């Protein structure tokens, strides 16, 4: 997820035990696939927002269930493939 | 506060299938089946597959047409994943009660009479467990609560089959007539410990429902079936006879067998497989500090291939001195194999079973006991186990188990070991 300092090939640490809150970065399930987005949950609006402005948010209207798989709490990145 | 025992049985719904679904969300609401070792037959079914009429143990080739027709997704068993997920569930449950018995990979018994009040009772406690296990692991569970283990099992069955319980059924929370009515509605084969053979005999006595068995005379049950049935009968009446077992008793026999990935026809290949199964059985034997007094070896052909000649045979080879030495046990097993092998058959499966187990410390010395040889054998086995632990199973093995292992297990469609291998983590794209 470009923009939230998560890049291709990174490992993310996901805590399933945390209850997702507004502004958390989450792993969510959309149409059977995983996606990483920022959770927008404010004044009754629920959206999954990409950090990359080139993509548009996914909006959850009344009655549509959002399945959050877990909250992203950290990232592990390898800088060198040597050693 | 009462000190009468209160047991909870927590059981993961369709455990293997549910594990697969946690890491592949697109499988939610698709029919999924998990196949046994060697992709032989169904060992776990999603509800969708159950309602298609696929029975537990149905061979894969018999459901292939159905699978194609209904888009059933079939997975090979992924025991690394299931074992790890099972440990996660257990560790969550241990937070609820220190008195816990892991009964199988997907079921645990807990004693909750001293802790349930902290949650406002057994039902709210069970609901919290359900919610927490679902959120933390992704796995759905049902909880059954009752005054005995057998009744907790029964309550769990009710919770699973009846939506009114919302996944948690506490028999204490019912009136007596309600309890009896539920017992009347479930057939006796669902009672813990009542297998199909006993069920048939019970049917002959007019005992068809759980209620019938509950109302049967424990004395008569004992006379007909033995002490275990008497206990079951008492447990159904709410008299607790079975305690939690926190330590698994050592196994009375150790079995190791597999179906072959491809049919095997030669004794050479059978020898290799038998030796290799024996190696893993003997390792387990040493881990529980037992020695075996006999080895049973068997071979069989594929009984589903009705057009092929059929043969199955087994033989017990007694050991002079009970032993845990892989090499000694292997040579006994191979002698047995030579005695039962017949050429001209396509063998589907072979296996060994170590029997007449006894505690190693209590071993009887015999006339031919050779302490020097025994010490040497012990050192060798220790080294072998240590190397195999360090570098992976089968690194060091007896020459008899062969190198190529053409017959090795088939696991055609195993999912990644998501939770135990860095290079198999789930990927978000």
Image (cartoon, coloured by chain):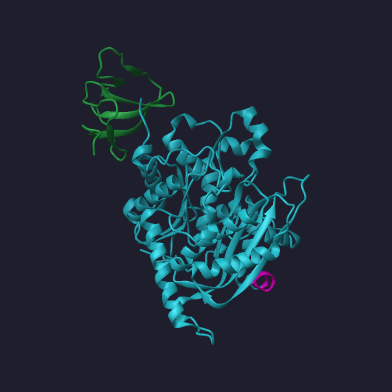
Chain colours: A green, B cyan
Q: Quadrant of the C terminus of chain B?
A: top left
Q: Is residue A43 above or below residue B376?
A: above
Query: Seen in the image, is B84 located left or right of residue B321?
Result: left
Where is residue B424 shown, x and y percent of the image? Answer: 38, 38
Q: Quadrant of the N terminus of chain B?
A: bottom left
At 58% from the left and 48% from the top, the residue drawn is: B407
Where is residue B326 shown, x and y percent of the image? Answer: 50, 67
Q: Is residue B251 visible?
A: no
Residue found at the very far top of the displayed protein? A54
At 57% from the left and 68% from the top, the residue drawn is: B331
Residue B286, by quadrant, is: bottom left
Q: Is residue B130 magenta?
A: no
- Magenta range is B220-226
Query: Seen in the image, is B59 located left or right of residue B356?
Result: right
Where is residue B256 shown, x and y percent of the image? Answer: 55, 59
At 50% from the left and 54% from the top, the residue drawn is: B171
The front one of B54 and B116 is: B54
The front one of B386 and B241 is: B386
Query: Seen in the image, is B252 located left or right of residue B286?
Result: right
Q: Is residue B224 above or below residue B16?
A: below
């Amino acid at each position: 997820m470009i923009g939230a300092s998560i890049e291709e090939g990174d490992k993310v640490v996901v805590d399933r035990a945390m209850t997702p809150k507004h502004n958390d970065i989450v792993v969510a399930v959309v149409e059977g696939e995983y996606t990483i987005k920022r959770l927008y949950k404010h004044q009754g609006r629920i959206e999954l927002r990409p950090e990359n402005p080139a993509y548009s948010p996914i909006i959850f209207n009344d009655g549509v269930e959002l399945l959050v798989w877990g909250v992203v709490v950290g990232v592990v990145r390898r800088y060198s493939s040597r050693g | 506060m009462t000190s009468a025992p209160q047991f909870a049985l927590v059981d993961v719904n369709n455990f293997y299938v549910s594990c697969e679904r946690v890491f592949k969300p697109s499988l939610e609401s698709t029919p999924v089946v998990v196949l046994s070792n060697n992709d032989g037959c169904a060992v776990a079914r999603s509800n969708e597959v159950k309602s298609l009429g696929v029975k537990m143990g149905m061979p894969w080739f018999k459901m292939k047409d159905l699978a194609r027709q209904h888009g059933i997704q079939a997975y090979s068993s992924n025991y690394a994943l299931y074992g790890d997920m099972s440990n996660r569930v257990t560790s969550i449950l241990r937070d609820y009660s220190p008195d816990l018995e892991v009964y199988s990979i997907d079921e645990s018994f807990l004693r909750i009479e001293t802790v349930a009040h902290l949650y406002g009772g057994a039902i709210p406690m069970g609901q919290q467990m359900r919610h927490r296990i679902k959120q933390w692991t992704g796995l759905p569970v049902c909880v059954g609560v009752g005054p005995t283990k057998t009744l907790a099992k029964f309550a769990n069955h009710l919770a699973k089959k009846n939506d009114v319980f919302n996944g948690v059924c506490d028999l204490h929370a019912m009136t007596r007539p309600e309890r009896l009515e539920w017992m009347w509605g479930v057939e006796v084969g669902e009672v813990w410990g009542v297998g199909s053979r006993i069920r048939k005999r019970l049917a002959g006595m007019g005992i068809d429902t759980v209620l019938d068995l509950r109302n049967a005379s424990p004395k008569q049950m004992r006379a007909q079936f033995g002490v275990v049935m008497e206990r079951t009968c008492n447990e159904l009446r709410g008299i607790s006879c079975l305690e939690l077992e926190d330590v698994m008793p050592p196994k009375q026999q150790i079995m190791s067998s597999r179906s072959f990935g491809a049919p095997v026809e030669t004794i050479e290949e059978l020898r290799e497989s038998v030796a290799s199964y024996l190696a893993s059985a003997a390792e387990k034997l040493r881990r529980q500090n037992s020695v075996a007094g006999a080895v049973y070896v068997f071979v069989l052909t594929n009984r589903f291939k009705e057009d092929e000649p059929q043969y199955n045979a087994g033989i017990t080879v007694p050991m002079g001195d009970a032993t845990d030495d892989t090499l000694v046990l292997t040579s006994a097993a191979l002698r047995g194999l030579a005695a039962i092998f017949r050429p001209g058959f396509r063998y589907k499966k072979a296996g060994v079973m170590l029997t007449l187990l006894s505690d190693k410390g209590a071993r009887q010395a015999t006339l031919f006991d050779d302490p020097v040889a025994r010490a040497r054998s012990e050192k060798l086995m220790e080294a072998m186990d240590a190397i195999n632990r360090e570098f992976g199973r089968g690194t060091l093995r007896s020459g008899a188990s062969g190198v190529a292992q053409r017959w090795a297990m088939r696991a055609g469609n195993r999912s990644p070991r998501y939770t135990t291998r860095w290079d198999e983590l789930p990927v978000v794209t």
